Amino acid sequence: MGFETFLGNPKAVKALRDMLTSGRVPGALLFSGPEGVGKKTLALMMAKALICERQPQGSADFCAECQRCRKSEEMLAAAREDLGRRREIKDAAKRVEGLIYFDLQLIEPITRYILTEQIRQLRSVAYTHPFEFPRRVFVIDAAQVIHWQAADLLLKVLEEPPETTTFMLVCPNAYELRSTIRSRCQRIQFEPVEEAIITRLLEEEARVPKAQRALAARVAAGSVAKAKTFDAAEFQKLRQPWLNFLDAVAGKSRLPAAEPDWAALFESTKALSQNREDFDQTLTVGYDLLRDLEQVLENEAGADVINVDLRARLSAWAKRLGFQGIELLKSGLDQAYRLQTRNVNQQVGLDDLAIEVLTRVPASPQAKG
């Protein structure tokens, strides 16, 4: 087990292995790129490679079997357990009491933020000699949510990095970090994982029904994490209200002289808006469907759609809505996204959006059901 087990992003893997081979590993690395592509996983692999007893022999890898590799897994498990326990503590002052950092330490948000005391402990330990390994490695996941006061402390450490410590920051967008912090890190950029790799993963795990794997691979959008957690039944449940909504505004009822199915329309908007906690996810499904409609309208034969199991329905909806209707729907979803944090009735907004589309977009006599 080693770097060869990592899925996708071969350039990122090669960059790290080249550092190991040359013996020139920067004091701070920044792993950035889309969610779910393995940034933290590869950072932890790199940490193990720096610690592994066999790495100095020129393997530019880690064995996962030597005493140090086994010990590193124990340290990571202890760190995860400690983080979980602290997140359950209601007293803010007690959440950060008694922080202990190992030679290999995973640092993640305890609350919405990575707290000042977490980075203060990092700074305190970073300049001490490692206890069990030849060097210390700190992996800071979700580095974009480091509290601003804690960011000041981290910057001071990065400005004068200790010789025996390596820092690895992980975040989706490097530009969410201060420019002064970015400039002191060597960036490892990640890209979405190729669809062929995602498809092969789904086939090997055989957890997703065969008929749903093409859909799962597209919905994953290059994210290994999304592919591994894809639940076909849950996705269908989340998507169905959007299908009902599109049927109401762009289905057969959009043929000339046909009266919209108002009951079905209002039932769909009710279903779309009833779960506020999952509304972000609901909007994502809606945006994906509108993207598919645009693609079908631009080039039906070559459309690279996400909802591959809906090609016929996408074609019919796209022809009846046209670009005007799709743009109206996109604007409506943008408005719904902006209003999420306010105490507004999202169903009313979706009802108004549907009525606007039905009023402003003429029915197409050429459209066929």
Image (tube, rainbow, N blue to C red):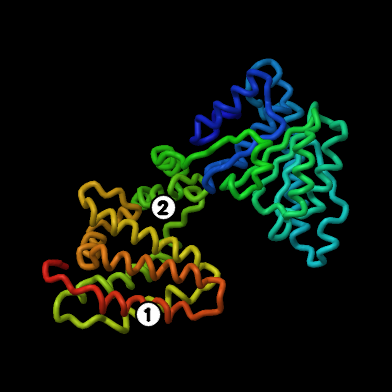
Name the quadrant containing residue 249. bottom left
Please tell me how crowded label 1 is: few (under 14), some (14-19), or many (20+) other residues with Cα within 10 Å: some
Q: Is residue 33 above or below residue 342?
A: above
At 57% from the left and 42% from the top, the residue drawn is 32
Q: Which mark is residue 219?
A: 2
At 25% from the left and 76% from the top, the residue drawn is 360
Left or right for 230, reference 117 = left
- Label 1 sits on residue: 351
Distance of label 1 from label 2 (alpha carbons):
27 Å
Point out the frontmost of discs 1 and 2.
1
Left or right for 196, reference 299 = right
Q: Amino acid at mark 2?
A: Val
Left or right for 90, reference 344 = right
Residue 351 visible (yes or no):
yes
Q: Nearer the viewer, residue 47 or 81?
A: 47
Name the quadrant containing residue 270. bottom left
At 71% from the left and 18% from the top, the residue drawn is 56
Residue situated furthest front in the rendering: 180
Please tell me how crowded label 2 is: few (under 14), some (14-19), or many (20+) other residues with Cα within 10 Å: many
Q: Residue 24 at x, y = what percent? A: 68, 22
Q: Nearer the viewer, residue 82 or 17?
A: 17
The tag earlier along the polypeptide, 1 or 2, is 2
Q: Amino acid at mark 1?
A: Asp
Q: How many marks?
A: 2
